[in-house]
Image (cartoon, rainbow, N blue to C red):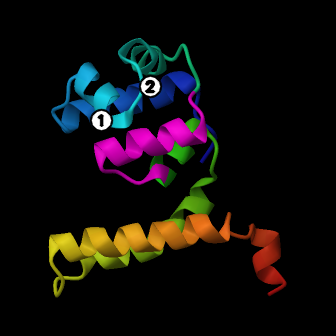
């Protein structure tokens, strides 16, 4: 998948915000960004940092990797690799929603602590 333009990221964010039934102000407050800044992102006037994308993803309850792909920060193949564990957790019918959220938070904290995942060329040599 080719990198998308910033405007595409904005449209995607707007769609996710509307699907979550959040106003611009509600999402801005939940993500800890200013209302005008979020508006500029949605209109394609600003390109947010990975940290801001992570805050937005958390507020929207979607994966940060999805927004990274939309912003062109992460390749689609890398995202697919990173989403396997969260997808397995979310698909497990034997644990509660609260347990799933706790597991996802623990998994994400380990990933942050250990740094970025190895690229394709590094994985081949392991």
Does residue 3 appear left or right of residue 63 in this picture? right
Element at badge 2? helix
Q: Is residue 65 magenta?
A: no
Residue 56 % position (x, y): 40, 38
Is residue 81 at least partly visible in the picture?
Answer: no
Q: Image point 56% across, 69% down: which residue?
A: 111
Mark number displayed over residue 30:
1
Q: Which residues are magenta?
A: 48-64
- Is the C terminus in the top left, top right, bottom left or bottom right quadrant? bottom right
Q: Is residue 6 visible?
A: yes
Name the residue rendered at 36%, 48% in the picture: 58
* Relative to 41, residue 27 above or below: below
Q: Quick one: label 1, few (<14), some, or many (20+) residues within 10 Å?
A: some
- Say the numbered circle drawn on residue 10: 2
The percent coordinates of residue 85 (x first, y second) are 44, 76
| N-terminal label among 2 and 1 | 2
Residue 73 is left or right of residue 14, and the answer is right
Q: Position of residue 52 (x, y in %)?
A: 51, 36
Q: Quadrant of residue 94?
A: bottom left
The secondary structure making up most of the magenta span is helix
**Which image quadrant is residue 122 in?**
bottom right
Q: CA distance from mark 2 to mark 1?
A: 17 Å
Q: Position of residue 22 (x, y in %)?
A: 19, 30
């Amino acid at each position: 998948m080719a990198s998308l333009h910033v405007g595409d990221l904005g449209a995607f964010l707007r769609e996710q915000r509307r699907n979550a039934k959040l106003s611009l102000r509600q999402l801005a407050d939940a993500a800890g960004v200013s209302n005008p800044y979020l508006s500029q992102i949605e209109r394609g006037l600003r390109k947010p940092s990975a940290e801001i994308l992570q805050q937005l993803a958390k507020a929207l309850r979607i994966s940060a990797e999805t927004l990274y792909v939309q912003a062109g920060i992460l390749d689609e193949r890398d995202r697919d690799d990173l989403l396997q564990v969260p997808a397995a957790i979310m698909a497990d019918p034997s644990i509660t929603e609260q347990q799933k959220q706790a597991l996802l938070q623990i998994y994400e904290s380990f990933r942050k602590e250990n740094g970025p995942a190895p690229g394709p060329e590094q994985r081949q040599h392991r």
